[in-house]
Amino acid sequence: MALLGGSALVVTLLQRDLVGQLDDRLRTAATVTSRFAGLADLARDLTPQARQSVEQRLTGDIHVVHLDPDGRERRTVRPAVANPPVLPELDSAAVAARDGRAFEVPARDGGPAWRAVALPLEGPEADGGSVVVAGSLAQVDATIRQLGTRVLVINTLVLVLLGAAGWFAVGVGLRPLRRIETTAAAIADGDLSSRVPGPADPRTELGRLTGVLNGMLDRIEEGDAARAAAAEQMRRFLADASHELRTPLFGIKGFTELYRMGGMPERADVDAAMGRVEREAGRLIRLVEDLLLLARLDEPASAANPPLRLTPMDLRTLAADALHDLRALDPGRPVTLTGPGGGPPGGAPVLGDEAKLRQVTSNLVGNAVAHTPAGTPVRIGVGTRDGLAVLELHDEGPGMSAGQAARVFDRFYRADAARGRTGDGGAGLGLAIVRSLVTAHHGRVELSTAPGEGATFRILLPPHHG
């Protein structure tokens, strides 16, 4: 529309300029002609140069007439070749009122209109008459039509080329959006691994949009994977918890049914069965308490779930207690107390819940006793390293593979085959509780192990400078 409107404006301005030029020529010719009363005077008085000037002015289809003072045509100086103009009433007063301004008149039998200029005759023989010089607009109309046709053709070609270029440019510009649409459709179908292909210039809007979308999709996929892993972990947790709870319950139920059926006639049999029932009940109690502890540690701190009771303490106290516990559980086991990695033990002040941290060391000691052969040397290290308080327990047992070490802190996981588990053992919650309690103290647990090289469980806590 802008192109067509601009072209129409150019044609209109050109038409006005051409008409203005015609008016100027007519006005000049009328001025020259008005100074003579007749053709004889014109022919006699004009020099060859003046006559040539007049002929140059009178180009195109020109109609020149002399009028009487009352407006009647006195003489046709130059008749029109085509349809002559139809002049209005032009007496002396009407000519004076027009004051030499050009005006438009129609043709007698239709066709192109005429432009005319009327001026009063001058000189002693003017007798109040006037001269009218009219020029046909045929040439102007033909020029405008020719120009309009050419402009229309040129504009049509330009619009076609612009349309083709625009179609191509829009197609190229929308191609990244089509890729985004394809990716969104794939994600809607469940393929969360789909990404908007690139590369895209990050300085452009589409480039930034592609980067943001891919980042969002990464987080969505990670969240979905985390939810799936959590659901799978919960499923395994429920299955393992059900299994661990079912085993002692079935034992208790079996003994009670045996007693009801009269399968324990002797007092000694009843006492033995009650002892087994008591042990199974104690196992149930420990398992339920461990599960409740893990559940409380998983919940955020609140009034119903108070935070840890933190007090200043030193990990050397826990290391000494762990040393005594190991010697009491396995008197033949060599146990040494050193610093982290060896050397003399050092102070390790922390701000912690002593009861919960004692449970950590108790679980580590129980794990070392349960999963290493009797008499296996154990080293307890305590001190500071890299600005952290450290408590570590190293055994020279069979060790674990990398896959087993990656899962050893999972709930209900037991690396029985690799660790040579003996005896009754636990439910596989001890190390999970260790990690949860240490994490609650804003610390971390590290494990260094390899098959045949033993295992080192290392507790690292923020130091306390009180």
Image: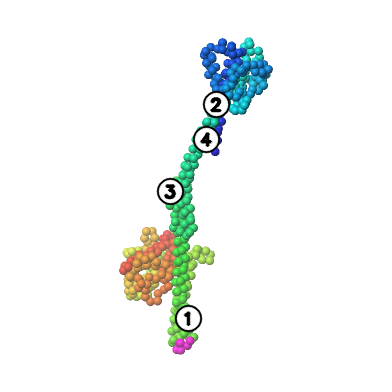
How far apart are the two marked residues, 1 and 2, measured between alpha carbons?
121 Å
Foreground mark, 4 or 3, reads 4
Q: Which mark is residue 152?
A: 4
- Quadrant placement of the N terminus: top right
Q: As displayed, is residue 318 above or below residue 100? A: below
Measuring 61% from the left and 21% from the top, which residue is drawn there? 117
Work out whether residue 286 can be spotted.
no
**With 70 as the anchor, is 356 left or right in this view?**
left
Measuring 37% from the left and 61% from the top, which residue is drawn there? 384
Foreground mark, 4 or 1, reads 4
Q: Which mark is residue 253?
A: 1
Q: In this orientation, which residue lies closer to the viewer: 188 or 369?
A: 188
For label 2, the crowd category at 10 Å Cα-Cα, with few meaning under 14, some 14 to 19 and many 20 or more, is some
Foreground mark, 3 or 1, reads 3
Q: As displayed, is residue 367 above or below residue 276? A: above
- Which of disc 3 and disc 2 is earlier in sequence? 2
Q: Which residue is mark 3?
A: 200
